[in-house]
Amino acid sequence: MERKIVYFEDKKAENTDVTFELVQERLNTLGIKKLVLASTTGSTAKKAMDFFKDEGVKLIVVPHQFDFHREINPFPLELVKTLRYSGHEVHFGTMLFHTDNLYESDVPTLMANLLRCFCQGVKVCFEIVLMATDAGLLKNGEKVIAVGGTGRGSDTALVMQAASSRNPRNLRVNEIICKPLNPLDLDGSGERVVRK
């Protein structure tokens, strides 16, 4: 089997549009009907809702959990209503790889750093699929496309089989659709490895 993978050489806003076009192509090829999408401020979710409106795809949008960095969540509550009214889901769950010494363990940080070796978006895709499955929005083993990114917008898309955080070893990446070419931006423009 051969499939196309796109590698983004630069971090730019247009990567979101290209990512969505590639995802649309793969949704049609594979007949997948659920798209799990990370969106911090709502701009990526809004763009996805407009882009995929005629595709018959259910969006599962996963913003940051409440009290992640700020007292007020940057994802607009009005957009939550709009998405849900349009038949999509929005889930504000616990971000599994952002726990400070959970149960006296550094394992979540270790897992996050290992996934960042592929790129920040791969870490995000793993996290949001686990979160959506924990919330009952996906079934274990269900095939979905997950979309995440580095900083603002989307630059990573994976075809995955869902699993819950109770059984993370059952999570599968079936295909890489796109990702940044240089996974760790060590020259200081944003992406980083978390250090203790």
Image: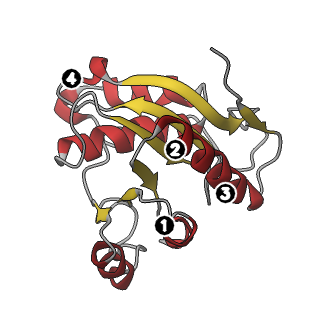
Q: CA distance from mark 3 to mark 4?
A: 31 Å
Q: State the residue position of label 3.
A: 16
Up/down of 152 relative to 128, above or below: below
Question: Where, quadrant-wise, is the C terminus in this rendering?
Answer: top left
- Mark 3 touching mark 4, by CB under 8 A? no
Q: Residue at x 39, y 48 (%)?
A: 33
Q: Specify the quadrant of the image occupied by residue 157.
A: top right
Q: State the residue position of label 1.
A: 45
- Mark 1 touching mark 3, by CB under 8 A? no
Q: Earlier in the sequence, mark 3 or mark 4?
A: 3
Q: Earlier in the sequence, mark 1 or mark 4?
A: 1
Q: CA distance from mark 2 to mark 4?
A: 26 Å
**As shown in the figure, which amino acid type bears the numbered disc 2?**
Leu
Secondary structure found at label 4: loop
- Mark 2 touching mark 1, by CB under 8 A? no
Visible residue check, residue 130: yes
Q: Nearer the viewer, mark 1 or mark 4?
A: 1
Q: CA distance from mark 1 to mark 4?
A: 28 Å
Q: Earlier in the sequence, mark 2 or mark 4?
A: 2
Q: State the residue position of label 4.
A: 167
**As shown in the figure, which amino acid type bears the numbered disc 4?**
Asn
Q: Is residue 61 left or right of residue 66?
A: right
Q: Nearer the viewer, mark 3 or mark 4?
A: 3
Up/down of 147 relative to 2, above or below: below
Residue 193 horizontal/vertical position (percent): 57, 34
Secondary structure found at label 3: helix
